[in-house]
Image: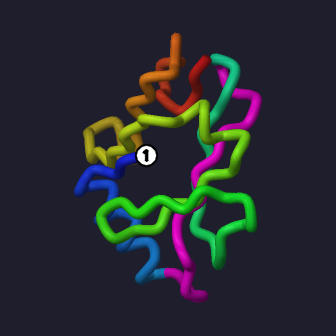
């Protein structure tokens, strides 16, 4: 299961409200690449794929493809605002290492 913090939920809701086409939810997936082996990918989408897991977190629909599910199960996603910049962070219990940017893990 993936969990969005209240801050992440607010950031996603804000993005949904500003989107031209009304998205159905947030797609989160993992792709090979990044500094540590895998990288997180996120984006608003109009509908889930047929084989996606659909998770509700804070009233936001989150779509995860079958390949990404075991890699990000149990992950908590937060949205932080800091002097260095704002963005989503991932607390992934499956990651054995990560890069300093926090967007890549292995």
Q: Which residue is mark 1?
A: 2
Q: Secondary structure at mark 1?
A: loop
On screen, residue 58 versus residue 34, left or right, reads: left
Residue 38 lies, in percent from the top left, at 67, 27
Residue at coordinates 57% horizontally, 22% vertically from top-left? 105
* Residue 10 painted magenta: no
57 or 51: nearer the eye? Answer: 51
Residue at coordinates 47% horizontally, 19% vertically from top-left? 100
Residue at coordinates 61% horizontally, 52% vertically from top-left? 64
Q: Residue furthest bottom?
A: 21
Q: Residues within 10 Å of mark 1 (few under 14, many from 20)?
A: some
Stretch of the chain drawn in magenta: 19-35
On screen, residue 26 versus residue 5, left or right, reads: right
On screen, residue 32 versus residue 24, left or right, reads: right
Residue 80 lies, in percent from the top left, at 29, 45
87 or 76: nearer the eye? Answer: 76
Quadrant placement of the C terminus: top right
> Where 80 falls versus 36 (above or below)?
below
On screen, residue 69 versus residue 89, left or right, reads: right
Determine which quarter of the picture holds residue 32.
top right
> Where 46 falls versus 12 (above or below)?
below
* Residue 34 painted magenta: yes
Residue at coordinates 26% horizontally, 40% vertically from top-left? 82
> Where 21 falls versus 11 (above or below)?
below
């Amino acid at each position: 299961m993936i969990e969005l913090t209240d801050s992440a939920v607010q950031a996603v809701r804000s993005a949904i409200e500003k989107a031209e086409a009304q998205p159905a939810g947030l797609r989160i997936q993992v792709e090979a690449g990044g500094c540590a082996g895998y990288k997180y990918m996120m984006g608003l989408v109009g509908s889930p794929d047929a084989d996606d897991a659909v998770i509700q977190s804070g009233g936001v629909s989150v779509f995860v493809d079958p390949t990404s599910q075991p890699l990000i199960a149990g992950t908590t996603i937060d949205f932080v605002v800091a002097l260095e910049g704002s963005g989503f962070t991932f607390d992934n219990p499956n990651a054995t290492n990560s890069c300093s940017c926090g967007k890549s893990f292995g």
